[in-house]
Image: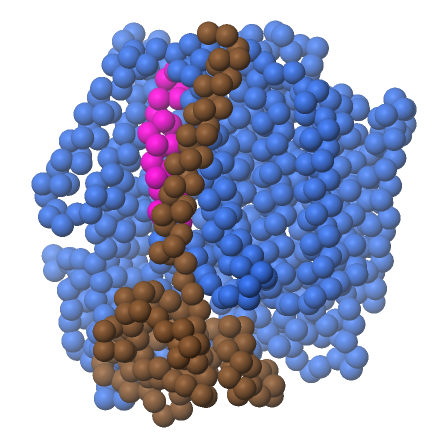
Chain colours: A brown, B blue
């Protein structure tokens, strides 16, 4: 085999690996992109049941109900709100009125079942997506930020 | 006073770095000995100056000098001493100071250990180190000064994030930085080689110890971080494909690739351009990781502060370093001649495959990590790329890599004999298949991934041991002769065996803990029992306890298998006062066969507590495996051939010939 031919084989095998990688990326990208939506966004751009996404906003005052390790609450951006259920241990700073980001999907009856609830480990912290969602809904109070 | 001394020392370090980055380069071009020698002295002065600055900041923390803004923002007089000290690097400014200090430390190490390096190469390497130092010191002095004063000084500080008040985390950043910054040395060697227009086996041998050291520290740093996430966050997970984790994983993958491609340069005088490029990429990824994490682009416990001025500086710095080095590469690389012919089935062929897979994996992770930032910048859409993406792209690349890991060391250089190798690996293949068969038979409902994982674990472990046994001709010649062969085998060969075994153990931990984890989630009242993973857990109730700077609700659990006495576990829910914050302290019983992991949540007001209990088989092996990998790297590093000051360019021929016949590593 000549030097050129061998180099060609190496380049070809490299291309093969890259092509496989590209295929893997393309097939899995669509499904694993997790979009962020605020409750108001969901009115404009509804999410189909079963599609995983992140829902963020404030935990609505007076909405938290506990039943053993199952918690029901509503996530609001002060214009719209969405009912959420979560089974598991809530993060340490989960409070009514606090910013929260939940990851999960809608069931067929319109309840958002969260597989993950993220409340940041800091009382003053507002997740940036939530802050932006509140600004969009016109309910942003700067003094609430810090 | 202390702060002013520190500030002055930093300015001195910056001035020194400017000279270190300029004079030796000029001297090397002119062939002026004194100008080249200047690099050594400059490296020493820079190290001394930054050490003084670091000590000054540490004094500020230890004495709780709240007139220093950085101390007031991140420390508290009631904090335990260990965390006062680790608090020095537990914040943006201090962590950058640590970075610069380690950079200077590596510069000094090159000056000290590199006595046998040719003057021009050494002075150029140190000059590039100096140039990197300029960037960091400017960044610290102009945007992130740790010595800024606060007037009037507050009575007490704000305190350190309680999540960071943890022994595992006290040492995670220094190790990670030793790894990140260690790659700056390989980067400097690569740039120096590009300037000189010369890469040869001697160069590869000089670079190898630095790559090995950086890789080993990075391994430990990542392992400590993941261990911390495992026991401190209380979620039971150890890796989340979080951008911050990816930021440390990508340089590790690139360093691993570099480690292997440099062997080809050393033994076959080939893959030179690629190796140089990898060295540039590995350090670029380290820089990007440092800044991605620190700049606040990514949100996590690591993002300390957001400041637009910093972001712009970082962007410019990244463009200069990465763009500049790639430009130099583009100009100089085509001048470097490639080496000998390659056969696909050969040691170098296997190493090329290793590099292909590792760099492709790095690229897919980079894509997944940066895509959300990119999309946000372009369209404002907020997305995140979750674990499914990374698993779907990384695992299909990692599995063939692990399979090839066994073949590689068996193959000869230049031309390997695949059927001969397969014959020698029959036993490994058989064992792997038997293990998979037994698991499939025993455990119904096992996933395909679990079977694949256990299969490649057995394949890699047994295959690696067979290769080692083959080298010392175990059981084929008298044992005493095998012993002699083993002693004579270069340490780098043993190091490779140990490191590959480490990888196998990590695979065991990941697969088994993922596939056979059992879990209980529910409200438990005192006196209640539950069985998880063959262990009986009795909840004895919860009480309030006070720690040095927190109050906690502490639960008491008795875990037993029924045959023995059992042991107690004490999970806590802590409430820190400075800064006010709650944390979950999981109670973990680590064992070789499995970890028991208990988390206590909120009280339900009716005497019960939300409780989560995990039984995670073999999970400790993930971290044991990482440590074994590190031990392999250390063993390899202790190889006499790799010691700096060993063979120079003159003895190159003899040394590489000896390397070829004596060592397969």
Residue found at x 73% / y 57%: B313
Question: Looking at the image, which is closer to me, B69 or B444?
Answer: B444
What are the residue bounds of the magenta stretch? B390-411
Q: Quadrant of the N terminus of chain B?
A: bottom right
Front residue of this view, candidates B359 and A67: B359
Residue B492 pos. (x, y %) = 49, 23
Does the segment drawn in magenta span residue B404?
A: yes
Which quadrant would residue A80 be assigned to in this image?
bottom left
Measured from the top left, where is residue B257 in percent x and y?
51, 32
* Residue closest to the far bottom: A62
Q: Residue at x 17, y 77 (%)?
A: B527
Q: Position of residue B248 (x, y in %)?
A: 52, 48
Confirm whether residue B110 shows in the render. no
Question: Which quadrant of the view contains residue B598?
Answer: bottom left
Q: In the rendered view, would you say B253 is above or below B159?
A: above
Residue B452 x/y as whole percent: 25, 38
| Dominant SS type (magenta) | helix
In the image: residue B508, left or right of residue B264: left
Q: Is residue B409 magenta?
A: yes
């Amino acid at each position: 085999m000549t030097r050129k031919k061998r180099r060609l084989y190496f380049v070809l095998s490299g291309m093969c690996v890259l092509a496989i990688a590209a295929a893997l990326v393309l097939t899995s990208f669509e499904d694993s992109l997790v979009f962020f939506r605020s409750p108001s966004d969901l009115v404009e751009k509804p999410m189909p049941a079963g599609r995983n996404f992140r829902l963020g906003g404030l935990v609505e005052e007076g909405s938290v109900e506990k039943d053993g390790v199952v918690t029901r609450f509503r996530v609001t951006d002060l214009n719209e709100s969405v009912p959420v259920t979560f089974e598991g241990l809530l993060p340490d700073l989960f409070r009514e009125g606090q910013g929260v980001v939940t990851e999960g999907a809608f069931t067929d009856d319109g309840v958002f079942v969260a597989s993950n609830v993220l409340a940041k480990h800091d009382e003053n912290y507002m997740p940036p997506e939530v802050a932006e969602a509140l600004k969009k809904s016109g309910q942003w109070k700067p003094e609430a930020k810090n | 006073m202390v702060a002013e001394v520190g500030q002055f020392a930093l300015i001195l370090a910056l001035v020194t770095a400017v000279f270190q980055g300029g004079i030796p380069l000029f001297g090397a071009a002119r062939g002026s000995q004194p100008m080249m020698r200047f690099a050594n002295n400059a490296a020493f002065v820079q190290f001394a100056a930054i050490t003084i600055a670091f000590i000054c900041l540490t004094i500020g923390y230890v004495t709780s000098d709240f007139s220093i803004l950085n101390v007031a923002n991140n420390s508290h007089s009631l904090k335990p001493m260990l965390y006062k000290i680790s608090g020095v690097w537990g914040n943006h400014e201090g962590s950058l100071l640590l970075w610069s200090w380690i950079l200077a430390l590596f510069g000094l190490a090159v000056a000290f250990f590199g006595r046998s390096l040719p003057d021009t190469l050494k002075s150029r390497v140190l000059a590039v180190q100096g140039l990197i130092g300029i960037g960091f010191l400017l960044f610290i002095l102009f945007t992130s000064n740790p010595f800024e004063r606060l007037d009037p000084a507050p009575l007490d500080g704000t305190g350190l994030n309680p999540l960071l008040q943890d022994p595992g985390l006290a040492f995670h950043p220094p190790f990670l930085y030793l790894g990140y910054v260690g790659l700056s040395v390989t980067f400097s060697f690569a740039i120096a080689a590009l300037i000189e227009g010369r890469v040869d086996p001697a160069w590869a041998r000089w670079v190898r110890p630095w790559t090995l050291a950086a890789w080993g520290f990075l391994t430990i740093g990542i392992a400590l971080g993941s261990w911390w996430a495992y026991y401190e966050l209380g979620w039971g997970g150890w890796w989340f494909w979080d951008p911050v984790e990816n930021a440390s994983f990508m340089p590790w993958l690139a360093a691993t690739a570099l480690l292997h491609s440099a062997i080809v340069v050393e033994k076959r005088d080939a893959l030179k351009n690629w190796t140089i490029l990898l060295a540039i990429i590995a350090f670029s990824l380290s820089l990007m990781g440092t800044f991605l994490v620190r700049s606040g682009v990514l949100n996590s416990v690591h993002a300390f502060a957001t400041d637009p001025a910093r972001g712009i500086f970082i962007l410019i710095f990244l463009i200069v370093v990465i763009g500049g080095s790639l430009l130099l590469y583009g100009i100089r690389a085509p001048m470097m001649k490639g080496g000998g012919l390659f056969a696909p089935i050969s040691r170098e062929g296997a190493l090329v495959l290793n590099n292909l897979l590792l760099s492709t994996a790095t690229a897919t992770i980079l894509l997944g990590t940066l895509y959300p930032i990119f999309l946000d910048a372009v369209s404002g859409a907020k997305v995140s790329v979750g674990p499914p993406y990374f698993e779907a792209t990384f695992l299909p690349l990692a599995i063939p890599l692990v399979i090839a890991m066994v073949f590689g060391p068996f193959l000869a250089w230049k031309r390997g004999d695949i059927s001969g190798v397969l014959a020698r690996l029959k036993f490994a293949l058989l064992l792997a298949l038997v293990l998979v068969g037994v698991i499939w038979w025993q455990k119904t409902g096992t996933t395909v991934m679990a079977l694949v994982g256990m299969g490649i674990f057995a394949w890699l472990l047994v295959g690696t041991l067979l290769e080692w046994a083959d080298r010392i001709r175990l059981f084929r010649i008298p044992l005493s002769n095998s012993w002699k062969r083993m002693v004579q085998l270069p340490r780098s060969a043993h190091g490779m065996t140990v490191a590959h075994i480490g990888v196998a153990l990590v695979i065991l931990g990941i697969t088994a803990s993922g596939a056979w984890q059992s879990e209980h989630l529910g409200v438990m009242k005192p006196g209640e029992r539950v069985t998880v993973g063959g262990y009986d857990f009795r909840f004895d109730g919860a009480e309030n306890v006070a720690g040095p700077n927190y109050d906690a609700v502490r639960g008491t659990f008795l875990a037993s298998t029924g045959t023995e006495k059992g042991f107690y576990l004490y999970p806590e829910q802590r409430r820190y006062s400075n800064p006010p914050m709650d944390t979950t302290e999981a109670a973990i019983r680590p064992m070789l066969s499995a970890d028991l992991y208990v988390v206590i949540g909120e009280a339900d007001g009716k005497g019960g507590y939300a409780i989560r209990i995990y039984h995670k088989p073999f999970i400790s092996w993930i971290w044991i495996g990482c440590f074994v990998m590190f031990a392999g790297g250390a063993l390899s590093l202790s190889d006499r051939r790799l010691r700096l000051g060993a063979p120079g360019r003159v003895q190159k021929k003899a040394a590489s010939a000896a390397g070829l016949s004596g060592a397969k590593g």
